[in-house]
Structures are given as structure tokens and as C-alpha cells.
Amino acid sequence: MTDVVAERRGDVAWIRLNRADRMNAYDKAMGEELNRAIRDAADAGVIVLTGTGRAFCAGGYLANLADPDPVQLRGMFYASLELFETIRTSPRPVIAAVNGAAAGGGNELVVACDLAIAARSATFGQTGVRVGSAPVLGGTNLLAMSIGEKRAKEVAMLCRRYTAEQALELGWINAVVDDEDLEAEVGRWADDLLGMSARYLEIAKISSNVWWNACRDNYIAGLGMLVQAIGSEDMREGATAFMEKRRPRFPSRAQRRVDEQ
């Protein structure tokens, strides 16, 4: 099975996450493959990211958190940052065609893209603090640039799921269409972009990265904290509970109650 499928449709590069069996969640190798596909598409006019099956992307592959290998997990964390930076610095506009659930790092992938168009059945949200992680790569500060600080904290801290219509209303994404119209609508946006100057589109895109660049030190600090917490009891419990589809019993929550007595 190929984890990432790249296809050219005229001057548009369609890149599809292709692990429907795990809702297109990515491990280090898949993240690196996606990164290469985006870099290799720099000669296209527009780049589109989408998913196979019922999900856009469920973020990092949580089996890695249930029994983590520190070296591999560190690699996945930093591969995520490299992937998002490739999107932000690509000379081409990158559109997220959100065909289904965008959760955790998958939602941060949407945030990293220049534009986002969603199928009506798509959902959005972070999962980090519910499963023993935290959204340090755009799910807090950069998302706040679109939906406001209080809303971004709500998204990061409460791990609620938001419909495509809600995401549109909040300014999270650009458009919502019926599921069967998603690819056609993305094609129309891509055609509009292809009618613009490639040179000045790149200038407009790169100059819009002021908030991404300003947040970069925060991303590095956040990754450093996540790396130090690899293998924590909360990480193991959160990931195990997620895989077992039950409510987590975080040790840090129990310890706090003991400390307060």
C-alpha cells in the first residue's frame, strides 16, 4: 500500500493521504513521504491535499503513544514541524480539500494550509489533551489568528468536535460544499489561482507568514516539552484509552486529588 498518492491534473498537484485503515493518521515515515510529495510539486501551479476514505487526517498515529519508542516518536514530532514548514514555505498555494474528519495533527495540517475547502460532512477539532498530548504546532496560537484566542483555547483544551458549517462561521476554513461537489469546487478555486501571476502569488503567500514565523520559537519550545514527556503515564493512558474507546483515567488527575487532600 502506498501511504501517499500524488497525481497531476493539468497544472494542479493532488496529493492524497492514503491510509484509510487508520483514518490517514501518519507516522514518521508517512509524514516524510508527504513532505517529499509537497516539495516535488513545487513545479505545479497549485497543490491540493486531501484524504482517502472517510477522514482527511486523524493526526499522528496513536499506537506510537501507547507504547512509545522515544527516538521514533521524537522523529514523528519534528517531522510534523518540517511538514508544516514545507507547506508554509512552498512557492505554490496549498489548498486543504477536507473530505472528512480533521482531528489533532490533521486539524493542524488544515491550519498550516493556505486555503481550506470542506465537504459538508467534515469535522474539525483537536484531540491532544484527551489522549496524552497537546497541539503545539498551530492548534493554539496560529489557529487563534483565524478564530480568536478564546475560541482557540476552547478548541485546544476541551477537544470538542466542530462541523464544517461551524468552522466556516468561525473563519477556520474558506468554504463548505456538499460532499459530492468537493473536488469540483476545489478545482474551481485552483483554476482561479492559476489565472494569477505565479510570481506575485508566491510573494503574497510568503509575506503572509508573519504569524507563522512569529510563532516558530513557540513551536520549538512546545515540541521540546512534548519530547520530555514521552512515555509519561498520562501519554500511555490517554493513547490506550483512545484505542480501547473508553474514558481515560489520567494519573496526573488522580495525583492532584491526593495532593489536595
Image (cartoon, rainbow, N blue to C red):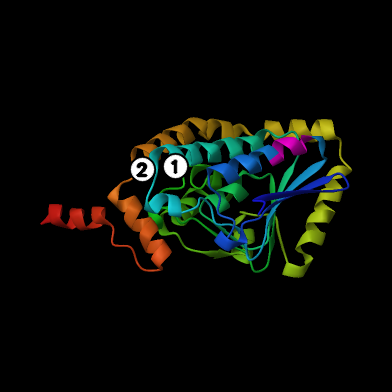
On residue 73, which mark appears? 1
Amino acid of disc 2? Ile
Q: Secondary structure at mark 2?
A: loop
| Quadrant where the image shows the N terminus | bottom right
* Mark 1: few/some/many CA within 10 Å (<14, 14-19, 20+): many
Residue 40, magenta (yes or no): yes
* Mark 2: few/some/many CA within 10 Å (<14, 14-19, 20+): many
Task: Return the residue at label 2.
Answer: 230
Q: Residue furthest left?
A: 261
Q: CA distance from mark 2 to mark 1?
A: 8 Å
Mark sitting earlier along the chain (2/1): 1
Q: In this orientation, does residue 95 appear? A: yes
Tell me the residue at 42%/48% (across/down). 134
| Quadrant where the image shows the C terminus | bottom left
Q: Is residue 106 above or below residue 196?
A: below
Nearest the eye: 200 or 47: 47
Q: Position of residue 12 (x, y in %)?
A: 82, 46
Tell me the residue at 55%/54% (across/down). 25
Residue 240, magenta (yes or no): no
Nearest the eye: 28 or 121: 28
The span picked out in magenta is 37-42
Q: Is residue 243 above or below residue 3?
A: below
Amino acid of disc 1? Leu
In this picture, residue 95 sits left or right of residue 219 = right
Q: Position of residue 254 (x, y in %)?
A: 21, 58
Q: Residue furthest front?
A: 1
